[in-house]
Image (cartoon, coloured by chain):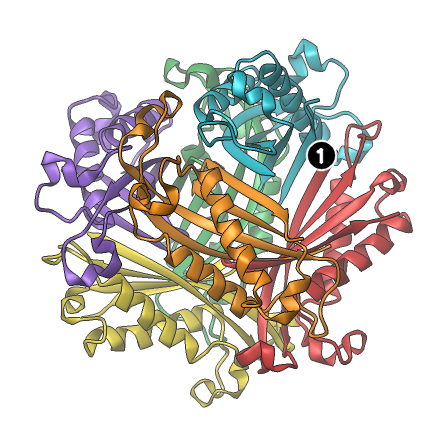
Chain colours: A green, B purple, C cyan, D yellow, E red, F orange
């Protein structure tokens, strides 16, 4: 299995609802350093998993829709805790849609699965991985 | 699949038995930077994999029982080489017990597997991963 | 010259005022991974620059007063942009006060200067360093 | 499952063929920081996955055959794009051969799979993983 | 003293002349992860050292003139060994010119010094620092 | 000012004497990831600060005399706490002697200062820097 990973980041504000979050129930924020792994069984005719330029641009676009925002005010996240693991899933879903609709190139349609990791500090991260099938 | 990872560290002394270890047969030591990944298929009602506060505290406790110690003198490790891979398994077993007995919260019982990684330097690490079933 | 450095982090929300900040004028947030370096010419009688336990605890306390907060609502920062460089200075000032009032131990009074670095992402950081004299 | 990982690096020149590569069609180069993970289900009698000294030396030898070279001139890569993912596979194949022929010790024959990761910058990496069976 | 640092990277090919370079006399290459630190005594009216957007763009432009190139063929480097330390100086000189000619904004003219660090692997880096006066 | 840095590591056991060390008074150990920076004002005729091969070998030798040892039993450290800052100074002194006696090459005698940093975990490090004059 081949994997290619690209990295970018976003900086957001949010608050959480639920006693389990302790002081994180207050309005606070995070830098998420985001890694996206693209996986497929065989390389394409150029010898690559995915066009890394298109992959990086797709990731930049997905993060731009979240970056420099207060996620508590985003209609998409109404009534949800935008935890690190939840946001990993959100980035996964939005990137998966882009792979499927061809925005990463025709060749990228052979990508079988994605893994999205959000590093929130030097001591914690969360990830979501899933199939594109 | 969702993953959440927390990091901590411990500093121990030990020596190894067996020609394969070369100079590491002498009394020496290591800093282990320890990553623990908790994995489950769906998030709980709060939108998390595990209470990260409880998870960090559980890891701290497991490491505290090893930290600042000469592992050659620990009864639990009598006659064993406390290699990085062996210690990854030890941390796994002790954390798995805590997940099972509910010390990471009732919700954490949905955690399906753990992966424990011990970074011993900038050029080497070892890990153990296994199911909690 | 000897240096000892300890690391911790905080997660805050804020917004900036001024066209130079572009989209960062919106409410957003950041994880700051914070390094504090303590410097002195000679080690104390124990062979250390500073009691690393007290230093880590002092840093934890200074960050706790900022952590999980919306800095736009903090009276101390009224009318100020809480940029990374400004916050590096804030942490410096608050830690310097603690060194001077003896909370890091009598021996720490021989510390000559501090350097505080705030890592805001994998591609940017800011620092403030100054004398304690 | 146990994993042990060792790290080394190589510095090479190459160029790519195909419009997808943009400016990377020109002669350029890369530092690849290379991680190799060795995986097996049970530890050997010494409590290890693999002799880390032999593993590091095998990796060093495999990289030495590529290091400080213009890969465009290597007969083995004639007509191929030596992309990061392609080179991850190359290192995998050459290390797998060494595991199989016993150069990492008899015990290493119980290693079930390898994962080879090439970090090409702070924002991109590629990997190949496969079974040794 | 305040510092702000931004990071980017470039991937180049080159060869060295001189027995001291051993195998690096052959055509090879490197990824340089480049950190540029901007230093000044006081923050400007916005509370910053430099417009981080303009600073990042200036660094991007300076690296673009070197990126994906065989430095042996660059007229500017005729007869010179483009070592890591030499390239750190080159990036310094080109960025310093941009600071002085106002391309980083009028406020950036108060920047007193720069430090440019090129990370060439996980085990080696070089830097050049100097005054802008 | 030019700087070149090389990295290596060592793994040692030791214990500390003094209430300030708390549990670190017990026999324990550490991995120290060691960075050595060599500094000089001008590059030599080859365009380098120091022969990086000789510098790495000198560092390897200095660390080999400490590596895989119980520092409590080393005659050189009798009655001393081998703290991270103390060991940074020790590595500095031993490398400085090698620079002065010509083992890093004649050209290295123009190196003006060294900085030795020992990373003991992901949250703490210590350093010693000094002139070679």
* Picture quarter with the C terminus of chain B: top left
Query: In the figure, is residue B76 to the left or right of A58?
Result: left
Nearer the observer, B28 or C47: C47
Residue F56 position in % (x across, y down): 50, 64
Query: In the figure, is residue B26 to the left or right of F2?
Result: left
Nearer the observer, B108 or A60: B108
Outermost residue to the top: C75
Figure quadrant of residue C20: top right
Outermost residue to the bottom: D75
The residue carrying mark 1 is: C23
Q: Is D120 located above or below residue D86 in the figure?
A: above
Residue E122 position in % (x across, y down): 50, 57
Residue B93 position in % (x across, y down): 16, 37
Q: Is C41 located above or below residue B16 in the figure?
A: above
Query: Mark 1 Cα within 10 Å, few/some/many (few <14, many 20+)?
Result: some
Q: Chain of mark 1?
A: C
Q: Is E106 located above or below residue F23 in the figure?
A: below
Count numbered badges in the picture. Answer: 1
Asked if one can make out residue B36 in the rendered structure from this viewpoint, the answer is yes
Circle 1 sits in a helix, a strand or a loop, which is it? helix
Figure quadrant of residue D44: bottom left
Figure quadrant of residue A41: bottom left
Asked if one can make out residue A1 in the rendered structure from this viewpoint, the answer is no
Question: Residue shown at 48%/31% (left/top)?
Answer: C48
Question: Residue shown at 48%/42% (left/top)?
Answer: A91
* Picture quarter with the N terminus of chain B: top left
Residue F61 position in % (x across, y down): 42, 62
Question: Residue shown at 57%/26% (left/top)?
Answer: A13
Nearer the observer, A70 or E98: E98
């Amino acid at each position: 299995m081949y994997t290619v990973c690209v990295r970018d980041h976003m900086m957001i504000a949010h608050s959480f609802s639920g006693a389990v979050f302790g002081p994180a129930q207050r309005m606070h924020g995070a830098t998420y350093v985001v890694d996206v792994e693209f996986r497929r069984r065989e390389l394409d005719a150029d010898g690559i998993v995915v066009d890394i330029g298109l992959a990086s641009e797709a990731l930049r676009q997905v993060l731009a829709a979240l970056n420099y925002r207060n996620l508590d005010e985003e209609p998409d996240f109404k009534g949800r805790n935008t935890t690190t693991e939840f946001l990993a899933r959100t980035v996964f879903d939005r990137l998966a849609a882009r792979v499927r609709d061809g925005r990463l190139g025709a060749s990228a349609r052979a990508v079988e699965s994605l893994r999205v990791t959000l590093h929130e500090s030097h001591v914690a991260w969360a990830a979501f991985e899933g199939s594109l099938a």
